[in-house]
């Protein structure tokens, strides 16, 4: 069902808005509207402009809140605004100190990695690196050379060249080292090394001692930095863990303050004789609105005007659904299609009943239904998944129809069918012959559902004062009479009863068709419009003819669409019969239980998914399309009720 709404206009002295919000409004859920947009007929209104002083602090505490492992499990304690702000500043200061330390270590780590990368290949060089870097009369170069070129260099050139090459380390491709050459021969020797693809590596003068000692010191410091970064990370975790209750409590306090202050964005101001007043407009449920008015009745600084009359069509009230707990998961399907408008019927209960009923009829098996019921129930309890709740409800009806069909995990002999066996139940239909009974029942059920949907459409149309959809549309009174006449005629014919006289049948069929054909001019006539028929009358009649033809086709296709209920009931039984054959249990033999278990799981998963989708298709295309628009807007409370509030 849809909660009844009341439109409230709240006003008081501008300086009193925070007290009003914290004392009264925080106890209730209110869907606020922009007062300037709502009160267009009121003169001299101005926006209530102030900067939220809590926004920065709230952003800060939100950054810490998001880092907590599972903050929703922590119950916030009461914390006043001043304590919340001071708590945030303390935690922020400690966090900034740790961040500064981390950035310092990270910067040193980056430089350390570069230094280690340079010195690592030369760590076996047992000479003082700083002394080498200060040579004046001997030129040197650190670098690397590919192994294949080094072999050629040593074999053909090295002995005839005034140079010393000291190998320091190698990898799969290169040999790392340093070569020395007299200063006066440096140009020539450098050129030879370059021709052998020697790649120079520049070593800065920041190393002390031998390369081995320098590498050891750098490597040790590198480890210390890593330990420092890990300790810093642990300190951040410890900071969050030690202050998690303070973080959650401060966030709750500032959320309330910020929401209270943000109300100003939707408020308007008007100038009185001696004071400036705020005006707030919004929607409350009737229960909350009455409680709010009773709460402020002795407060002289607050005045509230409640719209007690029928809600104006100019004001589109938001929709707040309130359904029994059993039906609540099915709100997901309704919201997927579109939330009902305030003056529209909430179809949640109808979806819950028809979806579960059709699913059970298409997927009737006691054992598999029990799996769906228990699996869905466990997931719904633990994870609060709406889809799991829907599966659990559908599983109950699968169990029911499993008893009706006499099916238990595909075994058809264990249980006696209370109603019928989908694969073998047959019935005679006049002029057609023998048909499977479940197909005939599915068509009859579809006709019944379509008639109910037409009634729902008439109810919704009366609420919306829509003349055409109430009387002359294909789903209105005219359509109900026409389709109901077809259903009644078919029922009488199949059951062997006499049909009404030809004159009665003509009235039952022709009059509704004429009304549907002339629905636009008849609507204009009822609404007393100046033009009854459009100017292009020939085009109107051609268009109306094809629209009426399309309506007749839609009646047929929509009705036949319900055949899928019987088809899936039969196919489910057929698939389980195949599983029994593969398991060797078809002729009463010793069954292969592994095949039976795997087969049941496969059918339960695959066909359960397909049936769920097909039932949803029936809901949306054959049921919803007849009476439901789903163009409502959701009720969004600007503030959540405070814990322990009376409302």
Image: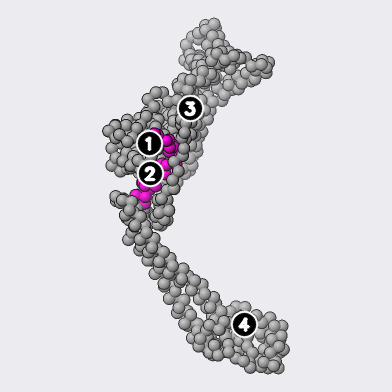
Residues at marks 2 and 4, CA–CA distance in whole angstroms: 68 Å
Which of the marked residues, 2 or 1, is nearer the chain's N terminus?
Answer: 2
Q: Which residue is mark 3?
A: 314
- Residue 196 in the image: x percent, y percent? 70, 83
Question: Which dot, 3 or 4, sits closer to the camera?
Answer: 3
Q: Secondary structure at mark 2?
A: helix
Question: Which dot, 1 or 4, sits closer to the camera?
Answer: 1
Viewer can see residue 629: yes
Q: Residues within 10 Å of mark 1 (few under 14, many from 20)?
A: few
Q: Residues within 10 Å of mark 4 (few under 14, many from 20)?
A: many
Residue 646 vs residue 3, the one in the foreground:
646
- Relative vertical location of residue 396 with respect to residue 116 in this rendering, above or below: above
Q: Which residue is mark 1?
A: 274
Question: Which dot, 1 or 3, sits closer to the camera?
Answer: 1
Task: Name the quadrant containing residue 94.
Answer: bottom left
Residues at marks 1 and 3, CA–CA distance in whole angstroms: 33 Å
Viewer can see residue 369: no
Mark number displayed over residue 260 = 2
Task: Name the quadrant containing residue 283.
Answer: top left
Residue 252 part of the magenta segment: yes
Q: Residues within 10 Å of mark 2 (few under 14, many from 20)?
A: many
Residue lying at the far front of the rendered structure: 274
Q: Which residues are magenta?
A: 251-274
Q: Secondary structure at mark 3?
A: loop
Q: Which residue is mark 4?
A: 143
Q: Assess whether mark 3 and mark 1 are in contact (beta carbons under 8 angstroms).
A: no
Mark number displayed over residue 370 = none
Residues at marks 2 and 1, CA–CA distance in whole angstroms: 25 Å
Q: Main secondary structure of the magenta part?
A: helix
- Residue at x 37% of width, y 54% of height: 70
Q: Assess whether mark 4 and mark 3 are in contact (beta carbons under 8 angstroms).
A: no
- Residue 550 in the image: x percent, y percent? 60, 22
């Amino acid at each position: 069902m849809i909660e009844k709404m009341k439109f409230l206009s709240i006003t008081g002295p501008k300086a009193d808005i925070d007290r009003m919000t914290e004392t009264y409004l925080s106890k209730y859920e209110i869907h606020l509207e922009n007062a300037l947009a709502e009160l267009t007929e009121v003169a001299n209104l101005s926006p209530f402009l102030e900067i939220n002083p809590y926004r920065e602090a709230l952003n800060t505490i939100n950054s810490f809140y998001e880092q907590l492992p599972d903050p929703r499990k922590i119950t916030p304690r009461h914390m006043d605004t001043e304590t919340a702000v001071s708590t945030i500043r303390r935690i922020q200061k400690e966090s900034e100190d740790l961040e500064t330390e981390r950035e310092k270590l990270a910067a040193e780590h980056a430089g350390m990695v570069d230094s280690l990368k340079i010195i690592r290949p030369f760590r076996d060089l047992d000479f003082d690196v700083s002394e080498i870097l200060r040579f004046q009369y001997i030129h040197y170069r650190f670098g690397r050379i590919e192994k294949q070129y080094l072999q050629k260099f040593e074999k053909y050139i090295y002995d005839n060249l005034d140079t010393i090459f000291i190998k320091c380390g190698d990898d799969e491709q290169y040999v790392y080292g340093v070569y020395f050459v007299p200063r006066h021969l440096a140009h020539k020797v450098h050129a030879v090394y370059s021709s052998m693809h020697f790649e120079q590596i520049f070593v800065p003068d920041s190393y002390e001692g031998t390369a081995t000692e320098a590498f050891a010191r750098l490597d040790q410091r590198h480890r210390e930095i890593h330990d420092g970064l890990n300790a810093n990370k642990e300190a951040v975790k410890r900071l969050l863990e030690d202050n998690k209750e303070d973080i959650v409590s401060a966030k709750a306090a500032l959320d309330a303050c910020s929401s209270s202050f943000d109300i100003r964005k939707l408020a308007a101001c008007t100038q009185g004789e001696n004071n400036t007043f705020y005006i707030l407009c919004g929607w409350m449920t009737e229960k909350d609105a009455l409680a709010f008015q009773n709460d402020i009745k002795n407060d002289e600084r607050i005045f509230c005007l409640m719209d007690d009359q029928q809600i104006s069509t100019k004001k589109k009230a938001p929709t707040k659904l309130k359904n029994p707990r059993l039906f609540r998961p099915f709100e997901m399907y309704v919201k997927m299609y579109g939330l009902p408008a305030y003056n529209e019927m909430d179809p949640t209960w109808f979806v819950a009943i028809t979806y579960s009923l059709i699913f059970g009829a298409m997927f009737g098996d006691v054992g598999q239904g029990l799996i769906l019921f228990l699996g869905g129930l466990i997931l719904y309890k633990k994870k609060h998944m709406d889809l799991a709740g829907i599966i659990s409800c559908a599983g109950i009806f699968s169990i029911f129809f499993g008893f009706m069909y006499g099916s238990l995990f595909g075994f058809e002999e264990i249980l006696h069918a209370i109603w019928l066996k989908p694969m073998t139940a047959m019935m005679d239909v006049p002029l057609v012959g023998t048909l499977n009974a479940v197909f005939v029942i599915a068509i009859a059920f579809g006709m019944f559902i379509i008639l109910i949907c037409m009634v729902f459409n008439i109810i919704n149309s009366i609420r919306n004062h829509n003349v055409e959809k109430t009387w002359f549309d294909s789903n209105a009174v005219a359509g109900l009479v026409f389709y109901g006449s077809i259903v009644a005629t078919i029922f009488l014919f199949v059951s062997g009863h006499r049909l009404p006289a030809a004159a009665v049948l003509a009235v039952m069929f022709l009059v509704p068709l004429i009304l549907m054909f002339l629905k636009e001019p008849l609507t204009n006539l009822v609404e007393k419009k100046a033009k009854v028929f459009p100017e292009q009358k020939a085009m109107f009649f051609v268009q109306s003819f094809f629209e009426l033809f399309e309506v007749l086709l839609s009646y047929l296709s929509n009705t036949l669409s319900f055949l899928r209920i019987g088809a899936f009931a039969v196919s489910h039984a057929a698939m389980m019969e195949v599983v029994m054959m593969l398991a060797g249990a078809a002729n009463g033999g010793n069954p292969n239980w592994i095949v039976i278990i795997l087969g049941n799981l496969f059918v339960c998963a695959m066909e359960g998914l397909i049936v769920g989708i097909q039932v949803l298709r029936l809901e949306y295309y054959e049921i919803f399309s007849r009476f439901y628009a789903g163009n409502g807007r959701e009720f969004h409370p600007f503030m959540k009720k405070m814990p322990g509030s009376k409302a």
